[in-house]
Image: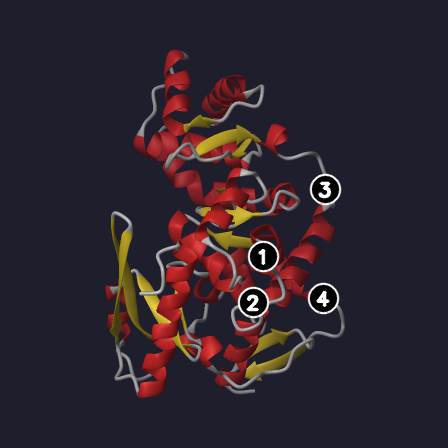
Amino acid sequence: MKNTSLVSLRLQQQQISRHDLTRPEQLVEYMVAMQAQEYAMAKWAIGLRLPKCTDAVVEKAFNDGKILRTHLLRPTWHFVAPADIRWLLMLTAPRVKIVNGFTYRQQQMDAALFRKSHAVIEKALEGGKFLTRRDLQEALKKKKIIADGVKLSALMMEAELDGLICSGPRQGKQFTYALLEERVPPVRRPDRKDALAMFGLRYFSTRGPASVQDFAYWSGLTLKDAKDAAGSLPSAFIKEKIDGIEYIIDPGHSPAKLTGTASFLMPVYDEFGMSYKNRSAILNPAIGSNEYLTFNNLFVIRGQIAGGWRREEQGKEMKVETSPFIKLNAQQSKELTKAVVQFRKFSGKGEK
């Protein structure tokens, strides 16, 4: 297998060049988790994979609680399905807490403080309330817990990791929190062994071809856990070495020719890049590596990074600027124009 075949399969598995789903909540559940600290771009990451979807549709699914946003896998926000949030926290929260340990010590935060802050947050939110971070900051302050900046963020993240809180609907542009037990009906949670096996199956089914190291990087699990999860995959999964790296491949699909469907405006932190420790397959060898760092967003032509893009909104108008890293031919330019139109349609800003 060559890199082009690897990229082709990933584009299919990630629902970028193949579209089997229609609703945001279906897509998020299929993808297991999607990095989402840049909220607007995280919504576009969903829209990219659902051609008829719009920003407003994703926003509604989020506000209705069909999609949740919380900290798991790594110390950053992810979109996650309600049915998956508890077992994903069981597997990944302990590892995130280890990473957060330095911040906790630096801010002089300990278990006693977390117990006290959790109790305040729970009391403030109970009864189906949705409160902003500032609201909860004031509730903490009334109980002599003074926190802002890094410390407040750490208190809120710990409450998320402990499964106390998750996202509520937005109030205007402000995010709110809700009690997880009130926001998400109880569901049967698998034991750790079964959860680990399911985690591996869903990762390699949606991100493959991928290596065990890719899975460990993306999930935040230890390499041992990642190997155990990979070892529990159905026997139909195959292994193949590409450039000396062993990849696990779901045999359900065959590589397809890279066409215009493999050209798109890639959101910052998109799973097409973030799902893998080794991203060499999508890097164009004709481009110097430093150029990748000059843009928040990158555009992809036929499965490889080819330039940067940005949007600028002025009232109801939106301007999309693209900056190729390489000289585009006529066909590539046409595909880039089509990709911009696709993003405009999603954003509700027309096709100009």
Q: At 52% from the left edge and 61% from the top edge, which residue is drawn?
A: 52
Measure the alpha-carbon separation of dots 4 and 2: 21 Å
Measure the alpha-carbon separation of dots 1 and 3: 21 Å
All told, the count of numbered labels is: 4
Is residue 95 in view from this perspective?
Answer: yes
Q: Earlier in the sequence, mark 1 or mark 2?
A: 2
Measure the alpha-carbon separation of dots 2 and 3: 27 Å
Mark 1 secondary-structure assignment: helix
Mark 4 secondary-structure assignment: loop
Q: At 45% from the left edge and 22% from the top edge, which residue is drawn?
A: 113
The kind of residue on which mark 2 rests is Gln
The kind of residue on which mark 4 rests is Leu
* Residue 216, picture quadrant: bottom right
Q: Is residue 67 above or below residue 237?
A: above
Question: How dense is the environment of label 2, judged by Cα within 10 Å: few (below 14), some, or many (20 and up)?
Answer: many
Residue labelled with disc 3:
189
Q: Are marks 1 and 2 in contact (CB under 8 Å)?
A: yes
Eye-nearest disc, 4 or 2: 2
Which label belongs to residue 15? 2
Q: Earlier in the sequence, mark 1 or mark 3?
A: 1
Measure the alpha-carbon separation of dots 4 and 1: 22 Å
Q: Is residue 167 above or below residue 147?
A: below
Residue labelled with disc 4:
233
